[in-house]
Amino acid sequence: MDPAFILGLVLAFGALLAMIGIEGASVTALLLPAPMVLVFGATIAVGIASGTLRDAVFAVKSLPRALRGDKRTAHSMIAAVVRYAETARSEGLLALEQFVRDENDPFLKQALQGIADGTDAEELRIVMEDEIASAAARNRAASKFFMTLGGFAPTIGIIGTVVSLTHVLENLDSPATLGPMIATAFVATLWGLLSANFIWLPIGGRLQRLGELELERMTLLMEGMLAVQAGSPPHFVGERLRAMVSQRPGEKGHKPEKAGRRAGSETTSNPVTAP
């Protein structure tokens, strides 16, 4: 499990609590049911209204993934592909079928089955690229939903503050209560900004990054398995995939890919650009 998400939220809310303590304020003064119900309830509601119900359901199902992260590493994937390359080199492509049942990655399992079935390389590439495109669309939908919530929340908080201030203006004949009422009115704005920047936007950004990593992983596996199908030597497959990994995440990476292609002309593939 990648602790970055939990660690970041704990530090963020910890900093907020530290500020409240330093200022001598009370946490209970911020935990008011009315503004919290409006901000969280209305934000989720308009988020659902801005898309489809299917998008909202899929986004909610993606929350555990945002918490867990992805425990699969590039090095473990490269090791698996190299192992398949060694098997194909020594026993033939048909021998890869023995690994299909035990493979847990659906994308890699599909590639193994396609190679074992004798699927044409170009057809296999098209199928795998379609799978990558579908995964990219799903990841964008989940990330966009929470990013949308992060955009709506501050404005809804302001709406709550305006409603509360309207109530304040109705009670101008009670000067003793104006201070607490005005402070309460701004709690809605606080929760709008807080939920957007401490919850919704971090979740959306986290899912976006995990989606990018998933696309990189799938692209890595596609290029590796196509190289296996082409009969490339296992050591070359490993070197090429390691070169692809070394260019991430900052570089766009056309140069390392071209170098890999010059090092071994027996594998034909398209340059990989990091998402």
Image: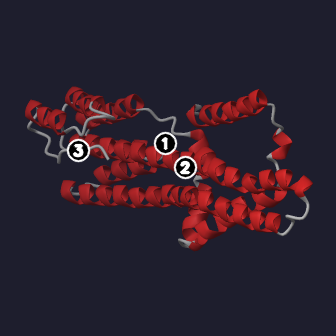
Q: Which residue is mark 2?
A: 201
Q: Position of residue 96 (x, y in %)?
A: 34, 43
Query: In the rendered view, does 70 fall on the left or right side of 118?
Result: right
Q: Position of residue 64 (x, y in %)?
A: 62, 47
Q: Position of residue 178 (x, y in %)?
A: 85, 56
Instruction: Identify residue type, mark 1.
Output: Asp
> Which of marks 3 and 1 precedes in the sequence?
1
The CA distance from mark 3 to mark 2 is: 29 Å
Q: Which residue is mark 1?
A: 102
- The residue that appears at 52% across and 35% down in the rendered structure is 71
Q: How many marks?
A: 3
Nearer the camera: disc 3 or disc 2: 2
The CA distance from mark 1 to mark 3 is: 28 Å
Label 3: how many Cα within 10 Å (few below 14, some 14–19, many 20+): some
- The residue lying toward the viewer, choosing from 263 and 189, is 189
Q: Which residue is mark 3?
A: 272
Nearer the camera: disc 1 or disc 3: 3
> Which of marks 2 and 3 precedes in the sequence?
2
Quarter of the image that includes the N terminus: top right
Instruction: Identify residue type, mark 2.
Output: Leu
Work out whether 60 lies above or below 31: below
Label 2: how many Cα within 10 Å (few below 14, some 14–19, many 20+): many
Secondary structure, mark 3, is loop
- The residue lying toward the viewer, choosing from 30 and 234, is 30
Secondary structure, mark 1, is loop
Q: Are marks 1 and 2 in contact (CB under 8 Å)?
A: no
Label 1: how many Cα within 10 Å (few below 14, some 14–19, many 20+): few
> Which of marks 2 and 1 precedes in the sequence?
1
Q: Quadrant for residue 122, please give it.
A: bottom left
Q: Quadrant for residue 80, please give it.
A: top left
Work out whether 38 lies above or below 16: below
